[in-house]
Amino acid sequence: MGRKKAALPGQLSDLDLRLLRVFRTVAETGGISAAELRLNLANSTISNYIADLEKRLDMRLCERGRSGFSLTEQGRVVYEASSELFSAVDQFRSRVNRSHQRLLGQLHLAFAEHLPGGPDSVMVKALRRFSDLAPDVKVEITTLSSDDVTSAVLDKKADLGVTVLLQVFEELASVRLFDEQMQLYCGEGHPLYGKTGITPQELADYRFVESPRLMPGREVSADVRLWNKQARAHHQEARAALILSGHYLGMLPEHMVRNWGYDQKLQPVLPERYGYTNSYQAIHRRHPRNAEAVGLFLECLQAVI
């Protein structure tokens, strides 16, 4: 029995690289529909690209249909091999860039959800400075929950993240940037709104919306274990909506409440007991594929803090 003909006997073309990039995005987002927004392509176009790549490689790369999306074993091999391929391409680009003293390529940033902020925010100032210094670098920004920012950097889906790091990872380097003060709030219409002399024991009678620091093992206080967490919203905007409804207590950053004009509709509850500080850090893998762009953005962040 003869061996199967090699799927890629010749050189990789630009089309091959484009198809591989589309396939990687589909794999990372978990399906064709989920990849539409990131790729800015129609579902049918993405499906055709995946089919073309499968035909080119003579492999079934993924299962897709009513039962959901999943990579085949061959699909996982191709995904891992393409990671090595594009990493090598990025390293080549970085070396060439250094020789020209000019930064090119891409920088994918992942920010904790409410960080981009207003015109005077740290992120806006850092982005302005970076764009002045590296105008040819294409910047992509994704906003995620704090935990998801860390995962994105660990999984090489983002080059640099700014988030609250609650755990140390050997793979990551971090630089402390700034702090934010968190408070427990109730909204206008809640029985505790406008009330003074509130005791910790009273809180057990009310409903809470869970946030990352109210999860088991992350509690800001032992009292949290007694709270009735009946809603869950790990994104700030969604949590604020539940608290503003007047039916839930929950944690929010002081600066967000102030900047959004919610300070007339929300009231801190026992701030001396339940207030705590989040320390934001810039994180990246210790050997990022585009180290020059990552290093420059870090310098920009530190310069405007």
Image (spheres, grey):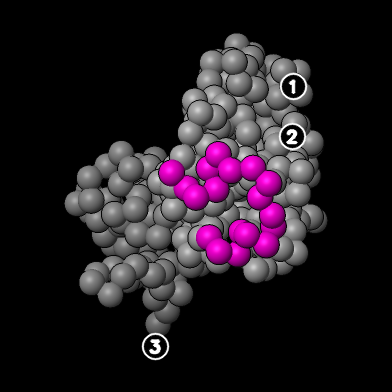
At mark 2, the secondary structure is strand
Mark 2–mark 1 distance (CA, rounded to whole Å): 11 Å
Q: Which mark is on residue 305?
A: 1
User: Which stretch did the figure color magenta?
Assistant: 189-206
What residue sits 65% from the left and 22% below the top? 122
In the depicted structure, whether residue 6 falls above or below residue 179: below
The furthest residue to the top: 132
Residue indicated by mark 2: 179
Label 3: which residue? 1
Hey, what amino acid is under mark 1? Ile
Q: Amino acid at mark 3?
A: Met
Does the image show residue 232?
yes
Quarter of the rendering occupied by the N terminus: bottom left
**In the figure, is residue 269 to the left or right of 57?**
right
Q: Could you tell me what secondary structure mostly forms the magenta stretch?
A: loop
Question: For residue 199: magenta?
Answer: yes
Residue 15 image point, x, y percent: 35, 43
**Direction from residue 96 to residue 172 in the image, left or right:** right
